[in-house]
Image (cartoon, rainbow, N blue to C red):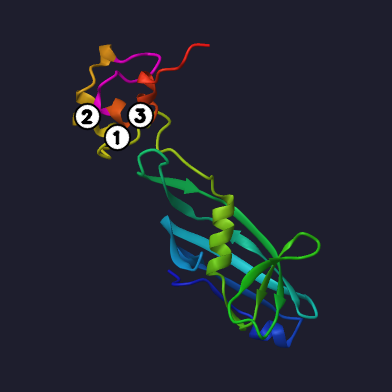
């Protein structure tokens, strides 16, 4: 298991005839987003394999594969959902010795370029961004997920909560979806409009 995915580019920077390779497995990735440290969790060890070749000058090309099984949250009930990904990696790279933290920038061609300074390159941020861009925006642990009670936060997949018990099924209004006067009705932002008096024209 690898703590962080690193590739050593010292020999490649000295001689364009060489290439650099790295591989291993990861059970998580640390990355920064909005100035805050974030962690990307995997359900099982995620294998990665990368190689970097010189293109001439300060430019290189990275290619490889990364196959994580992301742990995401169900959009309705927040349960863990496993999302398998099979990523084919490929990106231009540019060496700038003055750069302290690697970053991605968009080239004039529209392609993203990974800019780095240190010969020992930590690929954590790059792999995390590749996985997040490939992952769905939201997932459900089950298409029939009932979500959480908006009053108490109870997981309704485990059964009704005390708030649901106050709403007899036969009393539910098909049009509004909730009966007037119930706990859930009081949570409805439109419930107050029921008594609104509209002047006749």
Q: Residue at x 43, y 49 (%)?
A: 72
In-front residue for pair 147/142: 147
Q: Which residue is mark 1?
A: 149
Callout 1–callout 3 Cβ contact below 8 Å = no
Disc 1 residue crowd, few under 14, some 14–19, many 20+, Cα 10 Å: some
Distance Cα–Cα, label 1 vs label 3 = 13 Å
Residue 170 horizontal/vertical position (percent): 26, 11
Q: Judging from the image, what secondary structure is the residue with disc 1 in?
A: loop
**Earlier residue among tags 1 and 3:** 1
Callout 2–callout 1 Cβ contact below 8 Å = yes
Q: Is residue 66 visible?
A: no
Determine whether, in the image, residue 118 is placed left or right of residue 68. right
Q: Where does the N terminus fall, quadrant-wise?
A: bottom left
Q: Judging from the image, what secondary structure is the residue with disc 2 in?
A: helix
Establish if 190 lies above or below 5: above
Residue stretch rendered in magenta on the structure: 172-183
Residue 29 horizontal/vertical position (percent): 46, 65
Distance Cα–Cα, label 2 vs label 3 = 14 Å
In-front residue for pair 29/22: 29
Q: Give the numbered dot on residue 88.
A: none
Q: Residue at x 57, y 60 (%)?
A: 129
Q: Which residue is mark 3?
A: 188
Q: Give the numbered dot on residue 163.
A: 2
Disc 3 residue crowd, few under 14, some 14–19, many 20+, Cα 10 Å: some
**Quarter occupied by residue 161:** top left
């Amino acid at each position: 298991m690898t703590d962080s995915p690193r590739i050593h580019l010292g020999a490649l920077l000295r001689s364009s005839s060489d290439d650099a390779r790295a591989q291993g497995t990861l059970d998580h990735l640390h990355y920064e987003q909005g100035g805050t440290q974030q962690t990307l969790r995997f359900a099982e060890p995620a294998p990665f394999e990368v190689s970097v070749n010189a293109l001439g000058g300060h430019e290189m090309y990275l290619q490889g594969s990364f196959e994580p099984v992301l742990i995401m949250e169900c959009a309705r009930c927040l349960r863990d959902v496993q999302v398998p990904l099979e990523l084919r990696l490929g990106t231009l790279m540019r060496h700038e010795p003055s750069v302290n933290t690697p970053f991605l920038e968009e080239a004039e061609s529209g392609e993203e370029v990974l800019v780095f300074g240190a010969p020992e390159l930590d690929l954590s941020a790059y792999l995390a961004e590749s996985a997040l861009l490939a992952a769905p925006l939201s997932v459900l642990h089950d298409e029939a997920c009932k979500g959480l009670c908006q009053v108490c936060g109870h997981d309704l997949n485990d059964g009704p909560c005390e708030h649901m018990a106050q709403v007899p099924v036969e009393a539910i209004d098909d049009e509004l979806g909730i009966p007037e006067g119930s706990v859930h009705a009081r949570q409805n932002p439109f419930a107050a409009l029921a008594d609104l008096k509209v002047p006749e024209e």
